[in-house]
Amino acid sequence: MVKRILTAVAVSLLVCAGFAGAQSKTIKVGAAINLTGPASTWGQYHEKGQRDYFRYVNEVKGGVAGHTIEMITVDTAYKVPEAMAAVRKFVLQDKVDMIATWGAGEGLAAKPIIQEYKVPTINYSTSWEILEKPIDYMYLPFGSYKMDCYAVLEYILAIHKGKQAPKVGLLTYNNAYGRSIHAPSKEYAAKLGIELVAIEEFPPRTVDLNTELLRLKKQGAEYIFIQMLPSAIITAFKSADRIKYNPLFLGTWTSTDPDFFKMGKGLIRDRLVMQFPGGLPSDKTPGMAIMKELWSRYKTVDGFDAAYWEGIVVGMIMERAFIRAYERDKTINPATINAAMESFKDEDFGGIVPKVSYSKDNHEGSFTARIVKVKENGTYIPLTNYYVPGRDKIKLIKK
């Protein structure tokens, strides 16, 4: 059963000056997001970011070609059956024009429904498995976890000072999200000459990781590449302290949320870095200026947050797809939106996210990475340049 439905009230029917005379209509977006299950802080901030940006489009930008955007949110509680029910509701009852799905397992399970009803969908979890063929109608907002694996391993190689090959261990959930870094890490570590000493996985509700970390310590892992939600990272830090183990922890861009910084006082220290492909407040780009305007205008968040950031990014990509669909076909519906998405070529979002390109054969968005250090005060410090793993030379930023 779907637990909760939140429907946005369409506001402002102003017509954009560039599309004068366009008939006022509504673009419907369905969002199947975890609002109450494990790691729901992530989902709540995703929802806030996406909703705030659509509100901004309606109220400040006058909508899209005379259309307002209505966002229909269903709480999936991080459960696959709930997500599938939500997507069915979107396509059969709400007749949405576009969908956002949330977790890796949820997106994979909903994929057949999405492709049957041909509604373009962006998945918040950037699991590369979602883009295994067929990729029709399934999109990621930016590089997949495969990109994270390549970027993290290249960073380890760049900072490693020993004469022997770096020894890396994986510590992940035992679900689709956690395992999304297993195969790419094995493949790329072998290519780079990095020794992958062990893979330890555990159920999401585990409250003690002493055993897993003891095994990694015994195997000599100097670096721990993690794929778990922020609360579990705190558990890992506590367990590492108990067994007097001090490796460098490296994560994907999903490693932090607001609760992480509340729980992590005295625990985060200087031992966590992560791949984060987006803009930061310190970048002072036009895209980040819009994000700051949303903070001050709607006051749904207190400051920068990675989940809120991704919500805005998903909203921006969707808005751009609606604009391109109208420019191309003078109508906005699932078919014209999908065609518009596949025509994206270096779409610029003002530095809030790397330039986005899609084609019929590639729905990943971008493959541009950056490594940042996570600080206890909730800030992120760039450690590298932006780079394309496997192509560009990584440049360490000296502090």
Image: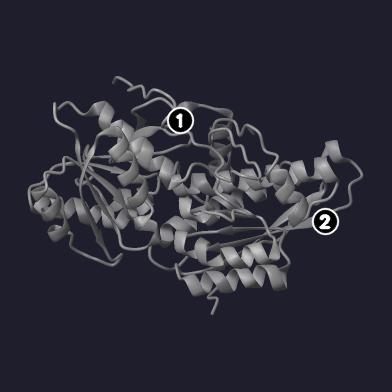
Quarter of the rendering occupied by the N terminus? bottom right
| Residue drawn where x is 64% and y is 62% of the image | 115
| Residue drawn where x is 13% and y is 58% of the image | 210
Residue at the bottom extreme, as displayed: 1
Badge 1 element: loop
Q: Residues within 10 Å of mark 1 (few under 14, many from 20)?
A: some
Mark linked to residue 105: none
Badge 2 element: strand
Between the residue at mark 1 and the residue at mark 2, the CA separation in whole angstroms equals 40 Å
Q: Earlier in the sequence, mark 1 or mark 2?
A: 2
Q: Which mark is nearer the camera, 1 or 2?
A: 1
Quarter of the rendering occupied by the C terminus? top left
Location of residue 27 in the rendering, given as x and y in whole percent from the top left corner: 75, 56
- Image: 117 above or below 138: below
- 311 or 320: nearer the eye? 320
Q: Quadrant of residue 150?
A: top left
Looking at the rendered structure, the number of numbered marks drawn on it comes to 2
Mark linked to residue 25: 2
| Residue drawn where x is 41% and y is 31% of the image | 390
| Residue drawn where x is 48% and y is 58% of the image | 44
Is residue 319 among what the camera can see?
yes
Residue at the right extreme, as displayed: 21
Mark linked to residue 388: 1
Location of residue 101 in the rendering, given as x and y in whole percent from the top left corner: 55, 60
Q: Quadrant of residue 313?
A: top right
